[in-house]
Amino acid sequence: MDFSFTETQDMLRDTLARFLADTYDFEARKKMLARPEGRDPGIWKALANELGILGAPFAEEHGGLGGSALENMIMMEELGKVIAIEPYLQTVVIGGGALKRAGGAMADALIPAIIAGEAVIAFAYAEPQGRYDLANLRTTARADGAGYVLSGQKAVVYAAPWASHLLVTARTGGSQREREGVALFLIDANLPGVVRRDYPTVDGFMASEIYFENVAIPGDALIAGGIDLVEQLVDEATMAICAEASGVARRLHEGTLDYIRQRKQFGVPIGKFQVLQHRMADMFIEVEQIASMALMGTLKLDLPAAERKAAVSLAKAKVARSINFVGQNAVQTHGGIGITQELAIGHYFKRGTMIEGQFGSADFHLDRFEQLTA
């Protein structure tokens, strides 16, 4: 089987890599984090207007490049290499994935806005009691005339402080943990009754606790698909952060390799010590396995649901354990400075640690894989 990328995919990777090398080094990222809004909005506009890469996975009829999940994988890996704080995952991968399946007037209006960098979507799915159970929902959407009334709370909604729209899971029926009765809504983030509490996350992003206080939403905000669509979107997002983990892990390994070549002890670089050479070799193996599992899982996203879920869980379980190994060894090799704000390696370590548990830990995905393949 040929695993090489197409000429267009290579061009996308190279274009984004060059742009990020020029505009998104570690010092530039620290300055972005220090801004009140936690990012530089001009970067998102440049990704849209100068590079045109926000349209990578969208159909040409909407102004996109006609790509797929593979294009998202390529973009996320490069963004991971600079631990970019741009809302590509939330807006393009998740929000765009929902819109492509919704179709109709909603997709016709919002997909071009995403491609142009004008729309930012945040995925409000997690609840304080829910852990990794996507059906464990207390947020409700009660039918009211031609629309709905949305009530409830969502936790750790990444990119919500910047969002123009929210993609929200809510119950239209059924009990708290039932699979039946789960619905997906795409709403204006500034509707009356939407209350946010914004905060920075440990990995440098911005997130919000969101409270829906009897928010009136129109009937056409409902996206068909139920829990099956929510699971598919989360599986696609899971593979996107596995690709991001590949970029993060590669930089953790490269940064640690540079460090042991420069740091001296007993008058020689510590990279001369055999135990550290073995450690670097083990880290490199895990880095390559993350890249392989990210590609494997991404290629299987179009399989039937049970096969897709099994492949995604197998990939995420391995990636979670591998990024933990790479991050822990990078910090241990650097010593105390490895977790400081001043050193880039600490920022990569924090993002890798968050990826480890995002959309399901290794233990969660191993359990899911066992249930699916029993």
Image: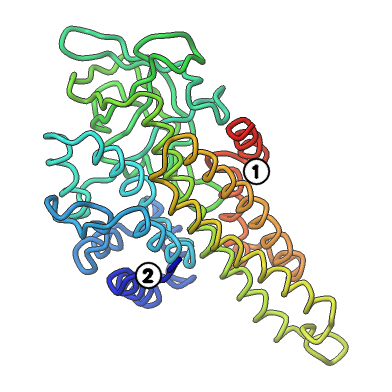
Q: Report the residue that reaches farthest toward the front.
A: 1
Question: Residue 60: x and y, percent?
Answer: 15, 55
Q: Do the residues labelled 1 and 2 touch (CB within 8 Å)?
A: no
Question: Residue 189: x and y, percent?
Answer: 27, 33
Horizontal side of residue 143 vs 256, given as left or right: left
Q: Where 231 sits versus 163, above or below?
A: above
Residue 327 shows in this picture: yes
Could you tell me which residue is drawn at 37 percent across and 70 percent down?
A: 5
Does dot 1 land on a helix, a strand or a loop?
helix
Foreground of the two, 42 or 174: 174
Q: Where 325 sits versus 302, above or below?
A: below
Residue type of the residue flagged with mark 1: Ala
Disc on res. 171: none
Which of discs 1 and 2 lies nearer the camera? The answer is 2
Question: Residue 164: x and y, percent?
Answer: 25, 40
Could you tell me which residue is drawn at 17 percent across and 7 percent down?
A: 145
Foreground of the two, 34 or 325: 325
Question: Residue 146: x and y, percent?
Answer: 15, 12
Could you tell me which residue is drawn at 32 percent across and 71 percent down?
A: 6
Q: Label 2, on which residue? A: 5
Q: How many marks?
A: 2
Residue 198 shows in this picture: no
Does dot 2 land on a helix, a strand or a loop?
loop
Q: How is the image coloured?
A: rainbow
Name the N-terminal-most of marks 1 and 2. 2
Residue type of the residue flagged with mark 2: Phe
Q: How crowded is mark 1: few (under 14 residues within 10 Å), some or many (20 or more)?
A: many
Q: Where 183 sits versus 93, above or below?
A: above
Q: Label 1, on which residue? A: 362
